[in-house]
Amino acid sequence: MKSMSIWTRAKFLMGLVVLTVMLAVASFATLSAPSAHAASTPKAHAIPHTASDCEGGANGFVDISDSLSGTVQRSVDMGAGVTVTLESGQVKGAQRGWAKISGQTLQNDQVWMDWTTDGGSTWLQCGPFYVDHDGYSKTSAAKNTSSDPNYQFRACGSLAGVGDVKCTSWW
């Protein structure tokens, strides 16, 4: 009878070990899986891009001067005295938006403009455009604006040697 009791205890302990391992595996799977909120939120994707996707009239973009200034719609402080702005104004007879990096820029700082027609679920990245010389501004190409609420822009940038990307909110 006593050996049966030891056997029963051994099976019980073995069952606890198996249960513990199963719970650990299930917990790991839950932690590494996207949350229910993330799964219900549509993933946003940038369409593969190069500066040529929006230079020289491609996709309806218009090339502009790097010194062009307009009405600042959104801005983000990049640090180190550099600001990325989303600007709008009259360009070649139409209301357009563009991205600009300015301030204490360094050569190879980057700026680009994201453009979406579906409220930010997908977008075309116009750029990146690289600052040519320290202290100079750089703009993206400009794109017509629209009153359609799904037709939006945002400006993004990255400082040379830092790698962190910062973007304005959508406008």
Image (spheres, rainbow, N blue to C red):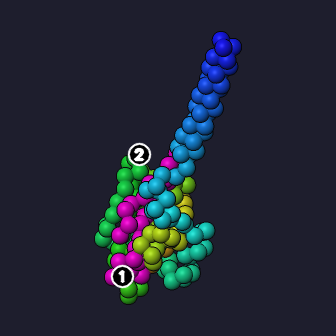
Is 82 positioned to the left or the right of 56 in the image?
A: left
Quick one: which residue is furthest to the top in this view? 2
Q: Nearer the viewer, residue 43 or 141?
A: 43
Report the mark closest to the observer, 1 or 2: 1
Image location of residue 2, percent across then percent down: 65, 11
Choose top left, top right, bottom left or bottom right for residue 145. Answer: bottom left
- Specify start and end residues of the magenta stretch as a single range: 144-171
Residue at numbered disc 2: 80
Residue at numbered disc 1: 148
Q: Nearer the viewer, residue 171 or 93?
A: 171
* Kind of residue indicated by mark 1: Asp
Residue 163 shown in magenta: yes
Residue at horizontal 31%, vertical 67%?
72
SS assignment at label 2: loop
* Kind of residue indicated by mark 2: Ala
Is 26 positioned to the left or the right of 100 in the image?
A: right
Residue at horizontal 54%, vertical 65%?
45
Circle 2 crowding by C-alpha within 10 Å: few under 14, some 14–19, many from 20: few
